């Protein structure tokens, strides 16, 4: 039975490492595409007229691409931490969710949205932010307790 568990753990680790390398390739590719679109967008914005609609279109693409790269980096960090500590950090998962929903909010067309949809998205952002706040606050208290314990031991 122990041998089967070891095989499962090693296979799981190999799969996680493969996912890590796959995600690394995707993030590198996304970064290259983002930078090329950024430079291309700047050059085309200079060449085109500086109308408000044209500038907003370029800004949506730039911020959306930036947040996509940021999501990929946070996912890489999550997988890396899982490999090191064999634990999924909830604060990182919440942060990735917040970045993802923020990216979605940037791409939304508010003129054609139902008010209930906007309310739902805002509720989701508030819930994720509050959850992130609570986890960070709990982590801060734990760190503070550990420092006090170390100070007493000395």
Image: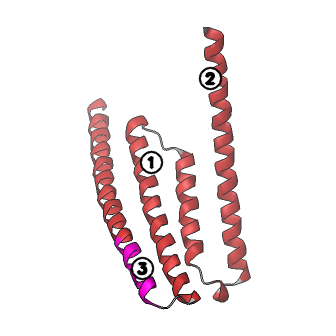
Specify the label residue 78 is tagged with.
1
Residue drawn at the location 27% of the way across and 45% of the way down: 14
Judge left or right: residue 67 versus residue 132. Answer: left
Quick check: 138 left or right of 82? right
The quarter of the image holding the C terminus is top right
Q: Nearer the viewer, residue 43 or 128?
A: 43
Kindly report the distance in space between the C-alpha atoms of the residues bearing marks 3 and 2: 50 Å
On residue 41, the disc is: 3
Q: Residue furthest top?
A: 154
Q: Is residue 144 magenta?
A: no
Residue drawn 70% across the image and 53% down it: 130
Which sits earlier in the primary sequence, circle 2 or circle 1?
A: 1
Q: In this rendering, is residue 23 above or below 79?
A: below
Q: Position of residue 40 (x, y in %)?
A: 37, 78
Please report the bounds of the magenta region as a residue range: 36-48
Horizontal and vertical percent for residue 4? Answer: 28, 37
Q: Which residue is mark 2?
A: 146
- Residue 146: where, in percent of width, then height? 62, 23
Q: Secondary structure at mark 1?
A: helix
Report the Cα–Cα distance between label 3 and label 1.
31 Å
- The answer to which image quadrant residue 44 occupies is bottom left
**Mark 3 or 1, nearer chain start:** 3
Viewer-side label of 3, 1: 3
Instruction: Identify whether 13 is placed above or below 146.
Output: below
């Amino acid at each position: 039975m122990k041998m089967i568990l070891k095989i499962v753990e090693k296979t799981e680790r190999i799969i996680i490492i493969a996912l890590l390398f796959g995600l690394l390739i995707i993030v590198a590719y996304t970064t290259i595409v983002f930078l090329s679109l950024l430079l291309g967008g700047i050059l085309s914005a200079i060449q085109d007229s500086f109308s408000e609609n044209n500038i907003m279109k370029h800004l949506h693409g730039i911020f959306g691409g930036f947040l996509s790269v940021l999501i990929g980096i946070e996912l890489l960090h999550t997988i890396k931490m899982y490999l090191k500590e064999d634990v999924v950090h909830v604060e990182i998962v919440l942060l990735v969710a917040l970045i993802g929903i923020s990216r979605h909010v940037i791409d939304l067309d508010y003129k054609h949205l139902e008010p209930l949809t906007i309310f739902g998205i805002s509720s989701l952002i508030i819930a994720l932010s509050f959850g992130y706040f609570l986890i960070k606050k709990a982590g801060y208290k734990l760190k503070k307790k550990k420092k006090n314990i170390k100070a007493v031991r000395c």
